[in-house]
Amino acid sequence: MKIEDSTNLLLAQRINKKQNLAGVLVIFGSPHSGGNCARLLDPVLAVFGAENCNIFSPFQAAPRFCDDCGWCKAHTECKHRDLDEFYAALEVCRVLVMVCPVYNAGFPAPVKAALDRLQRYYSARFFQNIRPPVKTVKLALTLFAAGQNGEKAAEYMNAALGKIYTVLNCRPASSVTASNTDKFGVSNEEVEKVRQECLKIKSVM
């Protein structure tokens, strides 16, 4: 699948119309619309149905970084409003899928910026005592594409996500890492593994 330039616009339109928000939210963390991450995403769309998936692209959105301004310690929102549509979809989705390449053993900068901006939910829980800060329980699937062996990096990235998930009412369900994609791309076996993990998640939704 190719991730079109209108991805985030479509997400905003669906939110405005209150359509198709309670299904799957995909954070598509690659700048490439038809690369390895898109190949990992294909079985997600096939199993859950593309019409039930909302895709958010941090590279397109170019979110402002969190500057620890403290606003969210006293308000149930972020002071910066560029991610309002993303927050709205995140709060009601039942499955959260992170599809991301590995950059220097970590997240690409736009993805990291979006993740840091989830601080508002941490503040809601620990400074405003809103528990849970996100009401809808969700399952998380993480899919990583690494140029070389990505298992160590995936372990670190999943650990970071695990801390974030605790304030999102999100339960880690599964993680798949495609390694050595610089040489071999994403294999059919890795695609099938993603499909099987999606089927497991769908069976308990």
Image: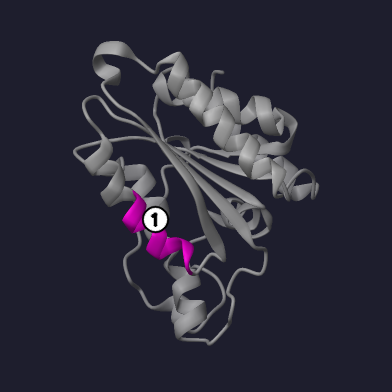
Type of the residue with mark 1:
Leu
Vertical placement of residue 34 versus 86, above or below: above
Residue 136 horizontal/vertical position (percent): 67, 63
Q: Residue at x 31, y 49 (%)?
A: 157
Mark 1 lies on residue = 161
Q: Which residues are magenta?
A: 158-166
Is residue 13 among what the camera can see? yes
> Quick check: 12 left or right of 37?
right
Vertical placement of residue 78 versus 84, above or below: below
Vertical placement of residue 197 versus 155, above or below: above
Per the picture, the main secondary structure of the magenta-coloured stretch is: helix
Question: Foreground: 82 or 99?
Answer: 99
Residue 66 horizontal/vertical position (percent): 35, 62
Say which element carries label 1: helix
> Quick check: 97 left or right of 9?
left
Which residue in the rendered view is the most extreme toward the top? 184
Q: Residue at x 29, y 35 (%)?
A: 102
Disc 1 residue crowd, few under 14, some 14–19, many 20+, Cα 10 Å: some
Question: Foreground: 156 or 113?
Answer: 156
Residue 115 horizontal/vertical position (percent): 40, 55
Q: Residue at x 63, y 44 (%)?
A: 201
Residue 154 horizontal/vertical position (percent): 30, 43
Question: Foreground: 56 or 149?
Answer: 149
| Residue 98 highlighted magenta (yes or no) | no
- The part of the image, by quadrant, that contains residue 6 is top right
Report the quarter where the N terminus lies: top right
